[in-house]
Every structure is written in C-alpha cells, then in structure tokens.
Amino acid sequence: MGGDRLENKTSVSVASWSSLNARMDNRFATAFVIACVLSLISTIYMAASIGTDFWYEYRSPVQENSSDLNKGLWTDFASDEADEKTYNDALFRYNGTVGLWRRCISIPPNTYWYNPPERTESFDVVTKCMSFTLNEQFMEKFVDPGNHNSGIDLLRTYLWRCQFLLPFVSLGLMCFGALIGLCACICRSLYPTIATGILHLLAGLCTLGSVSCYVAGIELLHQKLELPENVTGEFGWSFCLACVSAPLQFMASALFIWAAHTNRKEYTLMKAYRVA
C-alpha cells in the first residue's frame, strides 16, 4: 500500500516536472526566435543604410541647378582634388545627397555637362556620384572648410571618422553574434546566447554612437558653411534606417540575455527539484 502511494507520488512529480520543463522550453524558444528575427531585421537595415547615399539630402530650386554661374561647380565636384567646401557647395546647389561612402548631385544629362540647357521651368536631370576615398575619409577637417591655413578642427575630424567606422563595427559585431547563436542551436544550449546578447548590446551602442556623431557633424558643418537662400536640408531614409536599427539591436540583446540567464537559473532549480 505504501509502495503504491510512493509510486503514484513519484509519477505525479515526474509528470509535473515534464510539464513545467516543456512550458519553459516553449517560452525560451519563443524569446529566442523573436530575438533572431529582430537581429535579422536590424542587420538588413544597418547594411542598407551603409550601402545607400541618403543619410542627408539637400533641396534647391530648379533655377539654381540651371544657372550658368554654377556650371563650374559640376566639374569641381567630380575632381579628385575637390576639398570639403568645394563639394559641399555643389551639394547645396544641385539637390545633393550624402552617404557614408558617396556624395551625389542631380545635373542635366551628359550632353549638357559643360553647356547647361536653356533655363526652363523643368528639365530632365541625371544623378552623378563620386565616392569618398579612404584618404578623404581619414583626412583632417579644417576650422574654416577649404582653408588649409585655418588649422585642424579635431572635433569634426574625429566625428567624421567615427560616423564612418562605427557602422562597420556594429555590423561586424552582429554577424559574430549570429555565428555564436548558430553554434548555440547546434549545441542545443541557450548558454552561449549570453555572448550573443552582449555583442548585440555593443552593436546597438556603436549604431547609436554613429548616428549621434553624424548629427553632430552635420550641425557643426552648417555652422561653418551656411546654406544658400532657398536651399533646405533634411536627414534621409538611410539615416532613418540606422536610427531604427539601434533599438532593434537593444531589444534583441535584451531577449537573448533574458532567455539565456533565466533558462540557466530555472534549469538549476529544476535539477534541485528533481533530486528532491
């Protein structure tokens, strides 16, 4: 009689433990899948923002674009020796867009490269882009843009370098975190995902730092080079993608760390319960 009660008690305990363990596994698996989806979306957004040229956009009237007085800026913009003031003047006047790697302006077709068309209310334009070389990415910025004798502006110099490097560091951290997460799936363990969560947290900080550096750099540039009359500027969709990527990285990081930490803690409690 006593043996039957003990056997029933043991059966109930095993069934309860199995049911609780299954619920925990489902909860952690759900959190892990959601974190992976957030991580994938943030990676795509970050890669798209790095590879596109719409971090900042300028809007200027058509009359400015077709002015005979400004045709020399088109040639200067395409020159390998164009300094910061030269290419920014062209960006201001020709509906320019700026990315981390390239700068673009909208101009009349090639047939009018040196001789602009007659001024009309509207005309077809093509987009011409020039890539920033590595030397330009790491080149010093001057207190007076374009004036090499005005001294080096250290703040703007390091803001530019950080806005260029930090997105790549962020993308690299997320890819490395994904590799660790893949190893965790192969090993059927959530413990390594703590490292994945920490890497995503660092990636989010890098993305946030890059966005902050970019905003500060643009504001400082416009203090030194004022926009011409009737020209406006705004942050583009590439910049918005980077802004959205940062909170996604933080959310993925929180889910990865929560799932790994809580799973480890409850697994320890379940081992103690099973022994008892």
Image (cartoon, grey):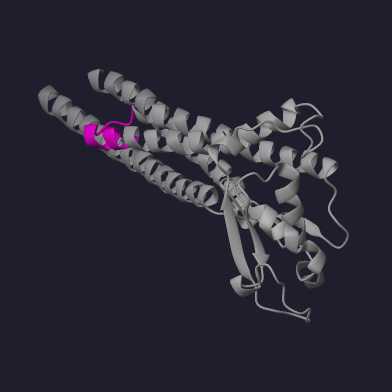
* Residue 149 in view in this figure: yes
Q: Position of residue 242 (x, y in %)?
A: 58, 47
Residue 129 versus residue 173 in the image, above or below:
below
Q: Quadrant of residue 144?
A: top right
Q: Position of residue 108 (x, y in %)?
A: 66, 72
The C terminus - image quarter: top left
Q: Position of residue 110 (x, y in %)?
A: 60, 70
* Residue 209 in view in this figure: no
Q: Residue at x 34, y 27 (%)?
A: 192
Residue 37 versus residue 181 in the image, above or below:
below
* Residue extent of the magenta highlight: 181-191
Reply yes or no: does residue 176 show up in magenta: no
Apparent side of residue 54 relative to residue 50 in the rendered image (left or right): right
Q: Position of residue 209 (x, y in %)?
A: 63, 34
For the stretch drawn in magenta, the main secondary structure is helix
Q: Residue at x 57, y 41 (%)?
A: 246
> Front-most of 268 and 190?
190
Apparent side of residue 186 relative to residue 145 in the rendered image (left or right): left
Residue 142 versus residue 83 in the image, above or below:
above
Q: Residue at x 72, y 72 (%)?
A: 116
